Image (tube, rainbow, N blue to C red):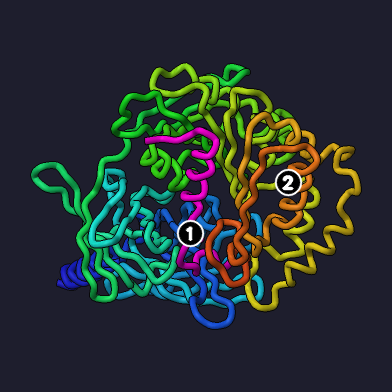
Amino acid sequence: MTRKLLFSAMTLVLLQVSSLCASEPDLSGSWAGGFGVLDGSAPRWSYVHLKLTHVGKKLRGQIRADHADNEFTGSLRGSKIEGSFRSSRRRVRFSGHLSENGTTVTGVAKYDRHSEPFRWDRLHIAREAPDYEGFYDGEDHRLLIRTSSYPGQLIAEDLTSGDIRLLVCQDHGHYTAGPTFLSTHPVTATFNFEVGQDGKTSLQRETKGEKIILNRREVFVSEDYSYRAPDGIEMKGTLFLPASQGAGPNPAIVWVHGSGKAKRRGSGSWPYIFAEAGFACLALDKRGVGESGGTYEMPDGGHDNPPHMARRAKDVRAAVQSLAKREEIDGKSIGLMGGSQAGWVIPQAANDSSVRFAILLSAGTTAFVYEGLYSDWAKEMESGPDAPPIEKLIERLRKKRPKDPKKRPLGIREHLVAMACPGIWFYGLKDRSNPSQICIDLLEEIKRDEEKDFTVVSFPGANHGLLECRFGGAAETGALERKVQGIPERIFAWLRERGIGGT
């Protein structure tokens, strides 16, 4: 009798433990959210995207933050969650609690001298997200919906107001957006996509109680594209073409990435904008990134240096030569466009008649060492009222700038002078990554002395990403709301003046 009672008691305990284990939440999967503050004197927001594996009490996985993939480690004990990741510039520690329904984590993120609230939400990954890409029109509104670099999520750009938002998928065809570019809460807008029986896609956007219906226009088609670099490496990307090519052939753009291990999605909205205007646009994975072959680093392990820029220029020039062989493309009207680090690549690739024009956004023209000095002095990763005044930093940099850039091996003046095509540059004067005014001064000097067809456009209130900003540092980017307006219009007017234009 005693043994039976003991066996029964043990069985009951095992069943209770089993029941408890079964009820333990499993955090494996994808999560999205961020940390920071959206109000006060120094708004700042960092978006994060996590893919977690939950075994026992341990959490491991990848967290995409600081524009790169980082390793995340943590633990879940009861409802308490702790974890951290280290990027190239900081270590961030999270401490918070899981909600009762297991779908939200809230708490405090600590890094450097900051202690800020954070929130993560379990993410629904939408496999159909690319099907919603395109331009949507209706009721005096015009939106561009494109796939983001985060799995299953979208970017919405209001081409009427300049507002830009990350859309987070909540369910099939249902997305939400927060009050700023990369914040996800509180939800301030909903986007509901619907595909009709005729196969056409419509969008209902609700913002502040106002609902509008927009219909998608078919303005582009896309296809996988590949070509060989001069050393035989296979480069891959996506070629965007106007949906209705008319008589053709079409002028074309090759997008040139900025720094880092960028994939084709890093081209942002430009392939869609150019396809709508009658241009083809090639967006590539960098060498050694995504589906492109080769290695990102140079043979000696270096990157983001003059040899790396020279090799990138050869890859870009080969892309131009490859596109020129396509029947639907006008081989005499192929140009280059890119941002930031592309400023050191495009001039080297545009030194012969194969490149018809160049468009550059926040592009570097100084020696690398001076761009690095400026970034450090300007505290490019920070943002707030205590940031050093940019005007004083520009004067400080002018005093350190070489008196004769022609003789500096790290400068690119000789490449700018050798450019065989017209160029247009756009700069934000609150840029804390690149010394815009120094770049503008050099371009104006070359334009005057060498009689170059160079055009420079500047925006006093814009940052490195050409978003309207308060302080210009990277920390506030996720807390911003809109792009500066008028850049596409300026580009197409400039192209038409030079006899280049789409439909």
Does residue 489 appear anywhere in the picture? Answer: yes
Does residue 173 appear anywhere in the picture? Answer: no
Question: Which range is magenta?
Answer: 475-503
292 shown above or below 73? above
Q: Please name whichever residue, 294 or 374, is drawn nearer the observer in this view of the structure.
A: 374
The residue where tag 1 is placed is 485
Task: Determine the residue positioned at 20% across, 70% down.
Answer: 12
In the picture, the quarter occupied by the N terminus is bottom left
Label 2, label 1: how many angstroms apart (C-alpha)?
23 Å
Queried whether the magenta region covers residue 481, the answer comes back as yes
Badge 1 marks a residue whose secondary structure is loop
Which amino acid type corresponds to the residue marked 2 in the rendered image?
Leu
Asked where in the image residue 452 lies, by quadrant, the reply is: top right
The residue sitting at the left extreme is 197
The residue where tag 2 is placed is 443
Which amino acid type corresponds to the residue marked 1 in the rendered image?
Gln
| Crowdedness near tag 2: few (<14), some (14–19) or many (≥20) residues, C-alpha within 10 Å | many
In the picture, the disc for residue 408 is none
